[in-house]
Image: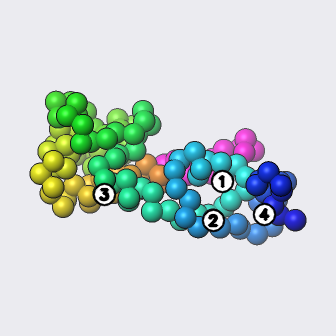
Amino acid sequence: GVNNDDGSLGNVDRRSKPRHLLGIADEPSILGAVKNGIDTMDSCYPTRLSRHGTLLSREGKVHIKSGRYSRQFGVPIDPQCQCSTCQQYDRPYLWHLFKAKEPVFMQLATIHNLQYMNDLMKEQRKLILEGKI
């Protein structure tokens, strides 16, 4: 069978057929799913986080509502990110938009969080192709 008693997919031949997982959420769950043979998934995780003021970063989550971000001038959400939000706006501006309840905040945060997730999955695909997963 496909499922083992421990919940893993066992020895999955990734070439046999794609496996899709619905409703996966946080990063550790996503990475675990990939390691266990899941090929595609959908998630509201990055957009839900955006709506609540949480931005994903390689350095950890940025909870933009915290006042500590109001003075980090010139610092993007994630210095390694190439999304338009990170390239054009810094943390204090995004903090201001969130605190002012500006609808554009959700757009900018979503653009960033989706790019972060795309980058994460790109790295996972690379590791699969290198035989490391």
Verify CB contact (< 8 Å) between mark 3 and mark 2.
no
Mark 2 closeness class: few <14, some 14–19, many ≥20 residues within 10 Å: some
Verify CB contact (< 8 Å) between mark 4 and mark 1.
no
Mark nearer the N terminus (1 vs 2): 2
Identify the residue shown where x is 19% and y is 43%: 95
Q: Amino acid at mark 3?
A: Arg
- Prevailing secondary structure class for the magenta stretch in the rendered image: helix
Residue 27: image location, x then y, percent: 53, 47
Task: Find the magenta span and give its range.
Answer: 119-133
Residue 21 marker: 2
Taking depth in this image into account, of 7 and 70 the one nearest to the observer is 7
Distance between the Cα atoms at labels 1 and 3? 25 Å
Residue 114: image location, x then y, percent: 41, 56
Q: Dot 4 corresponds to which residue?
A: 15
Q: How many marks?
A: 4
With 24 as the anchor, is 3 left or right in this view? right
Q: Secondary structure at mark 2?
A: strand
Taking depth in this image into account, of 60 and 66 the one nearest to the observer is 66
Q: Amino acid at mark 1?
A: Ala
Q: Amino acid at mark 4?
A: Arg
Q: Is residue 131 magenta?
A: yes
Distance between the Cα atoms at labels 4 and 2? 17 Å
Mark nearer the N terminus (4 vs 1): 4
Using the image, determine if residue 7 lies above or below residue 130.
below
Identify the residue shown where x is 57% and y is 45%: 28
Mark nearer the N terminus (3 vs 2): 2
Mark nearer the N terminus (1 vs 3): 1
Identify the residue shown where x is 59% and y is 52%: 30
Distance between the Cα atoms at labels 4 and 1? 16 Å
